[in-house]
Image (cartoon, rainbow, N blue to C red):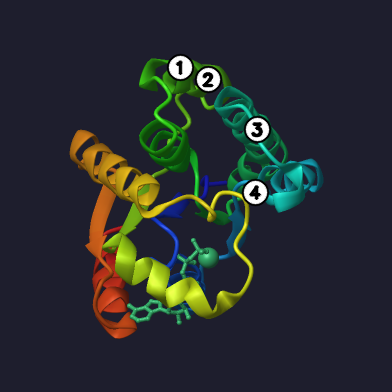
């Protein structure tokens, strides 16, 4: 059986990931592709428990290294117990966030040394990289204003604008480092404008 493709979607809060995921799932289904939708941190029973720990405000202060290692612990469960089994069955997998988020948030945002993130990546992820990453790019103010009405912010969303600016810049830097895999998509305009770019890119797969 032919192995499925692994697609990840990434970007700052309010970039439009969840919105576009609905479109991507529908679009791939019309092509007869079986698609498993999942997310990080999370995607497995243990991963979702780690997600709660990572994002809950009641968790309080957490050392940045702890945050990084918990992200990768959840990712290990995710890869081993969900993503790889699905791909091996021939399903495609679409993940809302993946390793690029660790480089952006814990690297760019928290300022952790990139070489440490790379060490964990080489342990947990090894050479298992997405076939394609859709990076939705939006200025932080626009993304934030889109999610403002959503109510209470989680532990990471409580950070200040500068933090998210660093996150965005780290994402952009990664898209330059891996131009074949990471497709940088302007998501600052209408939903339809973003959707059009995504469908054109998916057609290349
Ligand atoms: N291109 C767009 N133009 C205007 N509004 C948009 C656009 N894309 C998404 N939105 C709206 O912005 C809000 C946030 O979008 P969405 O939830 O898809 O972002 P997200 O990237 O998943 O955010 P998070 O990282 O917080 O999960 C939604 O109300 C959505 O309808
Ligand atoms: Mg979302």
Q: Are marks 1 and 2 in contact (CB under 8 Å)?
A: yes
Quadrant location, the C terminus: bottom left
Q: Which of marks 4 and 3 is nearer the N terminus?
A: 3
Q: How many marks?
A: 4
Foreground label between 1 and 2: 1
User: Looking at the picture, how far across and down is residue 136, in whole percent?
Assistant: 32, 61
* Quadrant in the picture for residue 23: bottom left
User: Looking at the picture, how far across and down is residue 169, in whole percent?
Assistant: 26, 44
Q: Earlier in the sequence, mark 2 or mark 4?
A: 4
* CA gap, disc 2 and disc 4: 23 Å
**Label number found at residue 120:** 2
User: Looking at the picture, how far across and down is residue 118, in whole percent?
Assistant: 43, 20
**Label number found at residue 103:** none
**Label number found at residue 116:** 1
* CA gap, disc 3 and disc 1: 17 Å
Q: Earlier in the sequence, mark 4 or mark 1?
A: 4
Above or below residue 60? Residue 192 is below
**Label 3 neighbour load within 10 Å: few <14, some 14-19, many 20+:** few
Q: Which residue, given by chain and number where applicable, does mark 4 sit on?
A: 86
Q: Is residue 195 left or right of residue 76?
A: left
């Amino acid at each position: 059986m032919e192995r499925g493709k692994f697609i990840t979607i990434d970007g700052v809060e309010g970039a439009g990931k969840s919105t576009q995921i609905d479109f991507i799932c529908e679009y791939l289904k019309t092509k007869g592709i079986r698609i498993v939708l999942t997310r990080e941190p999370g995607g497995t029973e243990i991963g979702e428990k780690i997600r709660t720990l990572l994002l809950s405000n009641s968790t309080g202060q957490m050392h940045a290294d702890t945050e990084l290692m918990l992200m990768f612990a959840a990712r290990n469960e995710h890869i081993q117990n969900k993503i790889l089994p699905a791909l091996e069955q021939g399903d495609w997998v679409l993940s809302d966030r993946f390793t690029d988020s660790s480089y952006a948030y814990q690297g760019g945002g928290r300022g952790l040394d990139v070489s440490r993130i790379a060490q964990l990546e080489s342990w947990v992820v090894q050479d298992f990289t997405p076939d394609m990453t859709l990076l939705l790019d939006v200025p932080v103010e626009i993304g934030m204003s889109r999610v403002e009405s959503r109510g209470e912010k989680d532990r990471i969303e409580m950070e200040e604008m500068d933090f998210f600016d660093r996150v965005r810049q780290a994402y952009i830097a990664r898209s330059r480092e891996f131009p074949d895999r990471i497709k940088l998509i302007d998501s600052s305009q209408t939903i339809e404008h973003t959707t059009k770019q995504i469908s054109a890119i998916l057609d290349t797969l």
